[in-house]
């Protein structure tokens, strides 16, 4: 079945292919992958349709076998189908799936894929169990910038839905002098979430790092904080 579904996914994406949209998406997303040129709502709809077929499976193993094949694809949208399929059944994610998703993070080549895995998949496990933040703290030491970025992005749902700004800020802490812009983007995103969930703690964090972290990292967030109309 996974082989049949894999072929179906590729065929249906090719049927919706738009070369012009593919060129524009590649330019916008700075992805090294090839593009069919299928709009995101159609990609999500296809992923949800396939995922629904696996709702009655005993576990997520069959879905992950299919998703694993799609994740290795050279096509950007096929990788997104893998992410959206698992996200569709995200309530059934278990701790044992963490290792699979970590391997996916190591194969990330574009920010949108990495954030999809970190927020929508890993983030659900972190939201349910704060102890995963101890694992993510080790990711902040990785030589892989996508893994460091994922360490921060995976805490966003916990800050947003659980009000746990502390967990996100603790993961930002060891990365505040990181030179990779993809990591800095994640830190700014996390700080913005924390400003909503716990303003006092986040203001203190920002003020403590002003003058220590690079201006390129904090200035955009500080300007937004000091001028809410921006």
Image: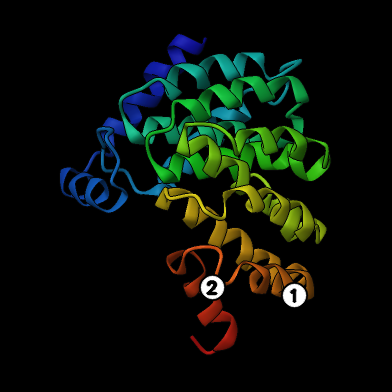
Q: Residues within 10 Å of mark 2 (few under 14, many from 20)?
A: some
Q: Residue at x 55, y 71 (%)?
A: 211
Label pair 1/2, CB-CB below 8 angstroms: no
**81 or 48, which lies in front?**
81
Above or below, 180 relative to 114? below
In the rendering, at what x and y percent does residue 42 appear?
41, 45
The mark nearer the N terminus, 1 or 2, is 1
Residue 99's image quarter? top right
Q: CA distance from mark 1 to mark 2?
A: 13 Å
In the rendering, at what x and y percent does residue 202 appear?
71, 69
In the rendering, at what x and y percent does residue 187 appear?
56, 56
Above or below, 167 relative to 106? below
On screen, residue 163 versus residue 46, left or right, reads right
Q: Residue at x 52, y 30 (%)?
A: 105
Above or below, 222 relative to 27? below
Residue 102's image quarter? top right
Q: Residue at x 41, y 52 (%)?
A: 181
Residue 228 in sight: no
Q: Secondary structure at mark 2?
A: helix
Q: Which mark is residue 199?
A: 1
**202 or 50, which lies in front?**
202
Identify residue for label 2: 221
**93 or 96, which lies in front?**
96
On screen, residue 208 versus residue 50, left or right, reads right
């Amino acid at each position: 079945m996974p082989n049949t579904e894999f072929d179906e996914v590729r065929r249906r994406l090719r049927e919706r292919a738009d070369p012009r949209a593919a060129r524009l998406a590649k330019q916008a997303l700075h992805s090294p992958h090839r593009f069919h040129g299928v709009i995101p709502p159609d990609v999500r709809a296809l992923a949800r349709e396939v995922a629904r077929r696996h709702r009655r499976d005993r576990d997520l193993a069959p879905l992950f076998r299919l998703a694993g094949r799609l994740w290795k694809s050279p096509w950007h949208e096929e990788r997104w189908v893998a992410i959206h399929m698992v996200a569709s059944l995200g309530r059934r994610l278990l701790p044992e799936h963490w290792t699979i998703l970590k391997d996916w993070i190591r194969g990330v080549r574009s920010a949108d894929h990495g954030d999809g895995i970190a927020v929508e998949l890993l983030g659900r496990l972190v939201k349910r169990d704060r102890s995963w933040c101890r694992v993510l703290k080790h990711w902040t030491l990785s030589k892989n910038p996508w893994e460091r970025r994922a360490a921060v992005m995976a805490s966003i749902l916990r800050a947003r839905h659980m009000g746990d700004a502390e967990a996100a800020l603790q993961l930002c802490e060891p990365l505040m002098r990181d030179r990779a812009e993809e990591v800095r983007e994640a830190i700014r995103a996390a700080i913005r979430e924390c400003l909503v969930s716990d303003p006092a703690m986040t203001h203190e964090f920002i003020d403590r790092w002003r003058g220590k972290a690079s201006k390129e990292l904090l200035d955009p967030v500080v300007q937004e904080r000091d001028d809410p109309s921006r």
